[in-house]
Image (cartoon, rainbow, N blue to C red):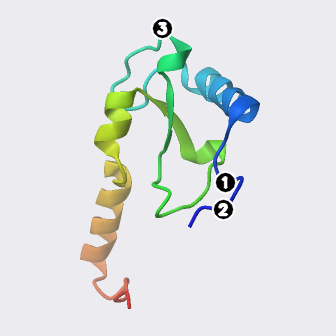
């Protein structure tokens, strides 16, 4: 459940967007298309909020709206494949969720 202040608004959102743009080169993280209009930029939680509820820059990437909508609440392929590999190596590693 999100608490007040868990998501960025206004000046803080613009500051984080600018930081991510400088860090990532103003490209969509998923399709790599460059952003020509800062208004077209969306912030996406790389690890979904439902898995890791943080809006720190280390968990945010810039994404175009189509890519952000397509990813939705899915885990990135890198993490999903890592979890599958760990489960295959040691099936007892992960317990059953109640």
Q: Is residue 1 left or right of residue 86?
A: right
Quarter occupied by the C terminus: bottom left
Q: Which residue is mark 1?
A: 6
Q: Residues within 10 Å of mark 3 (few under 14, many from 20)?
A: few
Quick one: 95 or 87, which is closer to the camera? 95
Q: Is residue 5 left or right of residue 53?
A: right
Real-space CA distance between mark 1 and mark 2, rounded to the nearest whole angstrom: 6 Å
**Element type at mark 3:** loop
Residue lying farthest to the top in this orientation: 36
Q: Position of residue 24 (x, y in %)?
A: 55, 26
- Seen at 47% across and 64% down, the residue is 51
In the picture, the disc for residue 98 is none
Against 41, residue 67 (above or below) is: below
N-terminal-most mark, 3 or 1: 1
N-terminal-most mark, 3 or 2: 2
Against 13, residue 34 (above or below) is: above
Real-space CA distance between mark 3 and mark 1, rounded to the nearest whole angstrom: 28 Å
Q: Which residue is mark 2?
A: 3
Asked whether the residues under the numbered discs 1 and 2 touch, taking CB atoms below 8 Å apart as contact, a structural biologist would say: yes
- Seen at 35% across and 47% down, the residue is 72
**Element type at mark 1:** loop
Residue lying farthest to the left in this orientation: 88
**Foreground: disc 3 or disc 1:** 1
In the picture, the disc for residue 36 is 3
Q: Residues within 10 Å of mark 2 (few under 14, many from 20)?
A: few
Real-space CA distance between mark 3 and mark 2, rounded to the nearest whole angstrom: 33 Å
Q: Position of residue 1 (x, y in %)?
A: 56, 67
Asked whether the residues under the numbered discs 3 and 2 touch, taking CB atoms below 8 Å apart as contact, a structural biologist would say: no
- Seen at 47% across and 53% down, the residue is 47
């Amino acid at each position: 459940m999100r608490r007040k202040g868990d998501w960025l608004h206004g000046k803080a959102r613009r500051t984080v967007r600018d930081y991510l743009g400088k860090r990532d080169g103003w490209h969509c993280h998923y399709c790599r298309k460059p952003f020509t209009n800062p208004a077209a930029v969306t912030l996406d939680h790389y690890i979904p909020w439902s898995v890791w509820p943080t809006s720190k820059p280390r968990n945010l990437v810039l994404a175009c709206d189509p890519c952000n909508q397509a990813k939705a609440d899915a885990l990135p392929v890198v993490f999903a494949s890592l979890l599958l590999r760990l489960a295959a190596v040691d099936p007892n590693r992960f317990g059953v969720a109640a």
